[in-house]
Amino acid sequence: MLKEQVKTLLDGALKEDESLFLIDFSIATDNSIKVVLDGDNGISLKDCMRVSRAIEHNLDREETDFSLEVTSAGAASPLVMPRQFRKNIGRKLKVRTNEDSFEGNLTGTTENGIVLEWKAREPKPIGKGKVTVQKKQEIEFSEIKEAKVVLKF
């Protein structure tokens, strides 16, 4: 019952700001509620507080004892939803599939996957030495085991 009640409150809070979306939602056996959010334009502390209040102020602690944590998906967290990939177009990603690993710029998304592009050094077709070539790889969402944004400092 608590899960349905929290989910309803959460959905209502997310409808107020269409740019926010849910990444993960769980309730442990000790009634600790964890909500992980992301946003098309990033997510602020204010956004997390607003969602937290929308849930907490509508639950009765006299009825059910609970703890609540509303957090954003961290910068180093893996991308798990197509909407997260769309928001990161233009950024460098490291993508691992069952078969291979790729690192390149996310240049686009399709209905079923992503498009990565990068430059690579390959042997010349004729003669000695290497030449720089532009590579492009389309990867379906179903093939992605893990995808992370490569952070630059």
Image: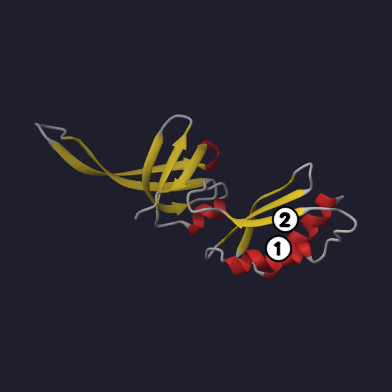
Position of 54 with respect to 138 (left or right) is right
At 66% across and 57% down in the image, what residue appears? 70
Residue ID for mark 2: 68
At 62% across and 63% down in the image, what residue appears? 20
Q: Residues within 10 Å of mark 1 (few under 14, many from 20)?
A: some
Q: Residues within 10 Å of mark 2 (few under 14, many from 20)?
A: some
Position of 1 with respect to 77 (left or right) is right
Residue ID for mark 1: 52
Where is residue 10 drawn, in percent x and y? 74, 60
**Residue type at tag 2:** Leu
Q: Which quarter of the figure is the C terminus placed in?
A: bottom left
Most extreme residue toward the top is 99
Where is residue 113 drawn, in percent x and y? 50, 46
2 and 1 marks in contact (CB < 8 Å): yes
Most extreme residue toward the right is 63
Front-lying residue, 88 or 131: 88
Where is residue 49 drawn, in percent x and y? 66, 66
Front-lying residue, 121 or 134: 121
Position of 42 with respect to 13 (left or right) is left
Q: Earlier in the sequence, mark 2 or mark 1?
A: 1
At 79% across and 66% down in the image, what residue appears? 57
